[in-house]
Amino acid sequence: MCIRDSTYIMSEFNDIIKDKKPTLVDFFATWCGPCKMQAPILEDVKKTVGDKANIIKIDVDKNTEIAARYRVQSIPTLIVFVEGEAVWRGVGLHQAHQLVDKINEFQHLKSDIDKL
């Protein structure tokens, strides 16, 4: 699955973040310098994690309802969701290894819960 970047309606967004595998959401704006720097990093993250996680981009100017719901006030804001629950949030530019580590942390956490 590639990184998705489009305008979402709330129901589509909710369906994506309810997945059992982690979903990393990048809240960004096209005019934001650090957001532009984050984009190729997310491509690297996706190459590393493959199908272990979903990665989507939400343009805060086109998706104001979703941005408001998650109280996105600074961009880029990155949120990891597992089964619809926000389990991690970071603001500002993040390096690939940091994001891969977070995805792996929540992938393994979910696997451990399933074993109980």
Image: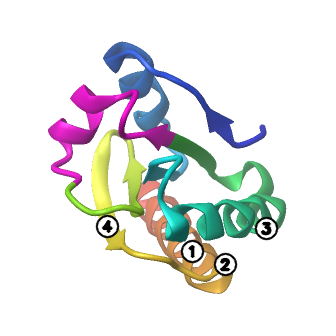
Location of mark 2 (residue): 96
Badge 4: few (under 14), some or many (20 or more) residues near its Cα, within 10 Å? few
Label 4 vs 3, first from the N-terminus: 3
Q: Which mark is residue 44?
A: 3
Q: Nearer the viewer, residue 112 or 54?
A: 54
Location of mark 4 (residue): 89
Q: State the residue lying farthest toward the front.
A: 31
Label 2 vs 3, first from the N-terminus: 3
* Residue in view at x 65 percent, y 85 percent: 97
2 and 3 marks in contact (CB < 8 Å): yes
Label 1 vs 3, first from the N-terminus: 3
Which amino acid, mark 4? Arg
* Residue in view at x 23 percent, y 52 percent: 72
Which amino acid, mark 1? Leu
Q: Quadrant of the C terminus?
A: bottom left
Distance from disc 1 to disc 3, alpha carbons, whole Å, reads 10 Å
- Secondary structure of the residue carrying numbered label 1: helix
Quarter occupied by residue 76: bottom left
Q: Which mark is residue 90?
A: none
Q: Is residue 35 magenta?
A: no
Label 4 vs 2, first from the N-terminus: 4
Location of mark 1 (residue): 99
- Secondary structure of the residue carrying numbered label 4: strand
In the image, which residues are magenta?
58-72
